[in-house]
Each structure stands twice: as C-alpha cells, then as structure tokens.
C-alpha cells in the first residue's frame, strides 16, 4: 500500500491522531487537517494530489458533505472519498447528489478501511 496519498480530515484531535497512527503504518504519506476549511485552504485549493480523502462528516466551519462537494467540483472526481460518521449514515447518504465512495460508522473498523484503501 505504499505510495498512496491520504488526506485525513477530522476535528477531534485524539481521533485524528489515532487514525493517522494506523494509516501511517500502511501508507507512505498521510496529510492531516482539523476541518474542511483547513483541508481546502492548505491542500485542495493548492491542487495537492491525493488518492484518498477520508473526512469526518460533522465538523465545525465546513463539514464533510461540503468538503465532498468542493472536492468533486474542483477536480477530485477520481479521488476516493470516504466519509466517517457517528450515526445516521443512510440519512447522510441521501442529503446530497454527490455521494461518498464509502461511508463508515465510528468507531472505524480499521481492517475494513485498509481493505478499501488497498483497492485504490
């Protein structure tokens, strides 16, 4: 799985660091952002290349659905988008015409997440 570039967007620092720790053991490069706004300003607006974007859905400033819409509109249509939520995944999936490639419920099943990322 080396050479896969992942953008991890999560507002809860403990969760973000834990997911980063797991992913870093399997990927060459993990970039982190604390919310959707930071992800756009520091990375996506600069046209940084990512194979996978993993984002929490419920975040301050700019949430995961808004980040998904931005990414798809700005040239990341071939980037695998993975959303994470604490619940209501079927409801969230119906909120937008843009869909996540995968929607995970927290706590994240890392074995499942890693298999999905390996498929990139």
Image: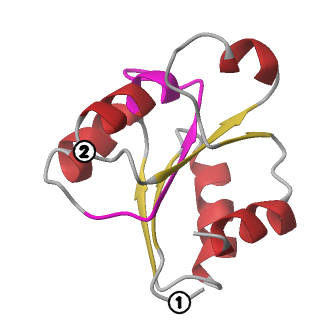
Q: Residue 11 or 30: which is nearer the viewer? A: 30
Instruction: Judge the density around disc 1: few (<14), some (14-19), many (≥20) Cα neighbours within 10 Å.
Output: few
Residue in the image at 19% along x and 41% along y: 41
Instruction: Judge the density around disc 2: few (<14), some (14-19), many (≥20) Cα neighbours within 10 Å.
Output: few
First along the sequence among labels 2 and 1 = 1
Q: Is residue 30 left or right of residue 24?
A: left
Residue in the image at 31% along x and 30% along y: 70
Q: Residue 71 or 56: which is nearer the viewer? A: 71
Per the rendered image, the range of residues in magenta is 49-67
Q: Is residue 6 left or right of residue 88?
A: left
Q: Position of residue 91 (x, y in %)?
A: 75, 12
Rendered position, 36 above or below 19: above
Question: As drawn, which residue projects farthest toward the left?
Answer: 46
Q: State the quadrant of the N terminus.
A: bottom right
Q: Position of residue 80 (x, y in %)?
A: 52, 53
Residue 2 badge: 1
**Callout 2 secondary element:** loop
Given this view, does label 2 or label 1 mark the residue nearer the observer? 2
Q: Position of residue 102 (x, y in %)?
A: 68, 44
Q: CA distance from mark 2 to mark 1?
A: 23 Å
Residue 5 shows up from this direction: yes
- Name the image quarter holding residue 21: bottom right
Marks 2 and 1 close (CB-CB < 8 Å)? no
Residue 88 shows up from this direction: no
Label 2 sits on residue: 75
Color encoding of the figure: secondary structure
């Amino acid at each position: 799985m080396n050479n896969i570039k992942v953008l991890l967007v999560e507002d809860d620092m403990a969760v973000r660091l834990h997911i980063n720790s797991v992913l870093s053991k399997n990927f060459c490069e993990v970039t982190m952002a604390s919310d959707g706004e930071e992800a756009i300003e520091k990375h996506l607006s600069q046209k940084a290349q990512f194979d996978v974007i993993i984002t929490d859905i419920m975040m301050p400033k700019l949430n995961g659905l808004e980040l998904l819409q931005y990414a798809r509109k700005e040239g990341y249509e071939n980037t695998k988008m993975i959303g994470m939520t604490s619940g209501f995944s079927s409801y969230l999936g119906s909120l937008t015409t843009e869909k996540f490639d995968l929607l995970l419920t927290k706590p994240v099943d890392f074995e499942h997440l890693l298999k999905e990322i390996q498929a990139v």
